[in-house]
Amino acid sequence: MLTAIRHRVNSRLGFFGLVVILFWLKTLLAYTLDFSLGVSGIYQYFILIINPLATTLIFFGIALYIKKPWWSYLTLLVLHAANTALLYFNVIYYREFTDFMTINTITGFSKVSNGISGSSLALTKGHDVFYWLDIVVLLVLLLARLIKVDKKPLPRRLPWALTSLGVVLFAFNLTLGEIDRPQLLTRTFDRNYIVKYLGIDAYTINDAFKTARNDQVRASASTSDLASVQQYIKQHYAAADPQMFGLAKGRNVIVIHLESFEQFLIDDKIDGKEVTPFLNSLYHDKQTYAFANFFHQVGQGKTSDAENLLETSTYGLPEGSLFSQLGSDNTFQAAPAILQQTQGYSSAVFHGDVASFWNRNNVYKNMGYQNFFDKSYFDAAGDRSIGYGLKDKLLFKDSVKYLEQMQQPFYAKFITVTNHFPFEMDSEDTDFPKADTADSSVNNYFQSAHYLDQSVEEFFAYLKASGLYDKSIIVLYGDHYGISNTRNLDLAPLLGKSADDWTAYDDAQMQRVPFMIHIPGVKTGSVQQQYAGEVDVLPTIEHLLGIKTKRYLQFGTDVFSSQHDQVVAFRDGDWVSPQYTKAAGNVYDQKTGTELTKLTKTQQTQVDDNQNRVTTALRLSDKLNNGNLLRFYTPKGFKPVQPQNYNYTDGFTKLAQLRETLGQKSTSLYSQNHDHSTADLYQTDAPEAK
C-alpha cells in the first residue's frame, strides 16, 4: 500500500492531489479550532467541509498549466505557501478582532505593523505549527528526491478539466449557500457568513471586488451626493439643553483615552481589592457627569475608529480603518479645527507609540491638530516601554514639559497604551492580584487596568498642583473592548454569569465603556442613565463649550439634549436602545436579556424603526467618508484645514518660540508660572522614573 501511495505521489497529478488535500485539512483545522462561524446542523457542516475545495482546485490548478516540470512543482508550492499565509494571517487577526482581514486591512497593514508584533506573538498557539509544517516537509522531500519530480507531460486537457471541476464545485457550493442564506453576496452580511459558506479565498476575492467598487464610487462622487446626508443631519439634530450649553466655556479640554477599558471594571474587585479605585471615585463624584450606558462603536479600526468617532462624529468604515485607508486624503471637520476656529483653542496629542501607527501622522494634520508628541519626543528605551509604547505613568509625567508650554485654552488628548492586549505587566510595575481564569490575558487584564487607574490618578494630582485642574474639563472614555468576544466565556464567571447562559445579548452589553465628563467646581454631576455612543461625544463637548453645532455634518447628538437619540448603532449594523438589543440576528429585551422570539405588532414596529435609523446612519456616514464628501461642504465661518501648514518635528521648540513671541500675551501655564517649569510638581511611583 505504501508503495502504491508513493507511486501516486511521484506523479505530477498525485503530488497536486496531495497538496490540495493538505491545504483542505489545514483549512478545516482553522474552521474547527480558530474560527467561530456559528455552524449548526448537518447541512451547514457539509457546506463548511466542502467549501475550501473549489477555490483550492482553481488556484492550485494554475501550476498544472506550466509545462516545465520543476517550474510546475515550484509554482504549486508557492501557491500553497501564499494561500497558507492568507489563511494563517486571518487566524491571527481573528484571535484578536473576532473578524476576518479585508483588502483594506491588508493594504493598510504597514500603517500599524510597527506595533503589532508583540500582540501577534501572544496570539500564537501550539497547533499553529501544523499550518506550516507540511510546506517544509514537502520541500525537504522534493530536495532530497524522496518525492520525485514527474517529467512526463500531462494530458493536454487535464488542467482545463480540473479548472472546470473547480468552477462547477464553486457553483454547487454557492447554490447550497444561497439556499441556506439567500442573497449571500448581494446583501450586507457578517463576514462570517461568506467564510462559512464559501471559504477564505472566495471571501477575499469578494472583498477585493467590493473595495474596487468603493474606490470607483469615491472617484465619481460629487456635490449632489451630499443632499441625502445633509437632510438626515438636519432631521436628526438635537438642540442643546439651555442649562448645559456653555457650562464649560473657555476651559481647557483634556481628553484621556483609556485604552481597552470596559465599563465592568468600574467598582469591580479582585480578591476584595478595587481594580480602579481612583476612576471609581471620579465616576461617583458630584463634579462628574458619568454614563452607565455608553457604548463603543468601533469596527476593525479599533482605537483609530474610536478617535474618528470622537473627533468627527462620523462612523468608521465597515471594513478596515478609516485612518489607514482614507485618512491621508480625506477632508475632516474635526474637534481641533472647530475649537481653534470658533474659540481660539490650541491643540495637541500625546502618544507613546510611533507617529505612523494608524497613519496618525497624516490624519492629525488633516484634522487640524497643531502638535503631535509621539514616541520620538520621549525616552521610551528599555523597560520604559511595554507592548505598544511608553508606559502610561511615564507618558503623563513626561508630557508635562510640553503641556505647560501650550497656549490656553487648549484641547489636549492623551492616548494611553499600557492596558492593551495581552495586558502583560513588568513585575516591578504592579502588585495587584491577577484574576483566576483559564485565560491568561483575562487574568492580566485587571492588573494592567489597575496600573492605568494609578496613572490617571497621578496625572490628576499634577493638574491640581499646577493649577490646570480648575481651568479645565477632563473627558475620560474607553475606546473599545479589552476582552474580545472569544474570551467572554472565560470572563463570564467573574461577572456572576454562567458561561453556558452567555448569549449574543451579553456580548452586546460588553460593548459598554466608561464615559465621564469631569468639570471641577460643578456640583450637579451624577451617573446618567441615557444610552449613548462615541459618535455623540463631539456635539456634547461642543455644546458644553458654547459652540453651536447645527452647521456641521455630525451624526451624533448631544447626550444632555431632550432630543438625544438613544438608539446606539454598532458598526456591524446591530444596536442597543433602552428597550431592545439587536445582536446576531436576534432581538432581546434590554432590561431582562430575554430573547424575544415573537414580537407584538408594536414591538416589531419599534424594532424596525430602530433598525432603519441605524442602517440609514451607517450608510450615509459611509457615503460621506468613502466619497470624501466634506470636500464639497464648508460650514459657515469654517475654513478648510490646510494640512501642509502642520509639521510635527521639533514641537517643543515651536511651542517655546510662540510663547516668547507672545511675551506678556502668552497664556501658557509656563508663562503664568513666571517662566518656571511645573514638571517638578509631578509625583509618580513609576520605578523607571527614579
Image (cartoon, grey):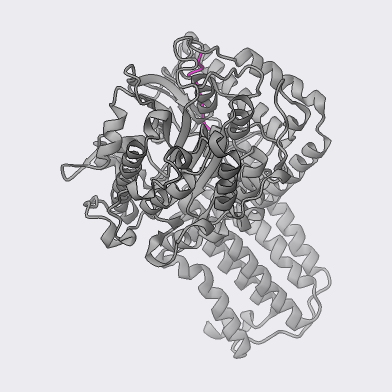
Residue found at the far bottom of this picture: 144
Q: Residue 509: image x %, image y %?
A: 39, 31
- Please give the name of the residue rendered at 30% of the width and 31% of the height, measured from the top-left corner: 282
Q: Is residue 189 magenta?
A: no
Q: Nearer the viewer, residue 135 or 380?
A: 380
Q: Quadrant of residue 675?
A: top left
* Magenta span of residues: 564-571
Residue 28 visible, this orientation: no
- Please give the name of the residue rendered at 63% of the width and 55% of the height, measured from the top-left corner: 106
Q: Is residue 193 above or below residue 15?
A: above
Q: Residue 586: image x %, image y %?
A: 46, 28
Q: Is residue 94 above or below residue 13?
A: above
Q: Residue 690: image x %, image y %?
A: 30, 61
- Please give the name of the residue rendered at 56% of the width and 23% of the height, measured from the top-left corner: 556
Q: Main secondary structure of the magenta part?
A: loop
- Please give the name of the residue rendered at 41% of the width and 44% of the height, measured from the top-left corner: 260
Q: Residue 458: image x %, image y %?
A: 31, 44
Q: Is residue 565 magenta?
A: yes
Give the number of marks.
Answer: 0
Residue 415 visible, this orientation: yes
Q: Nearer the viewer, residue 645 or 278?
A: 645
Q: Nearer the viewer, residue 367 or 63?
A: 367
Q: Quadrant of residue 500?
A: top left
Indicate left or right for 388 with 270 as reference.
right
Indicate left or right for 447 with 661 as reference.
left
Indicate left or right for 252 with 495 as reference.
right
Indicate left or right for 233 with 227 as reference.
left
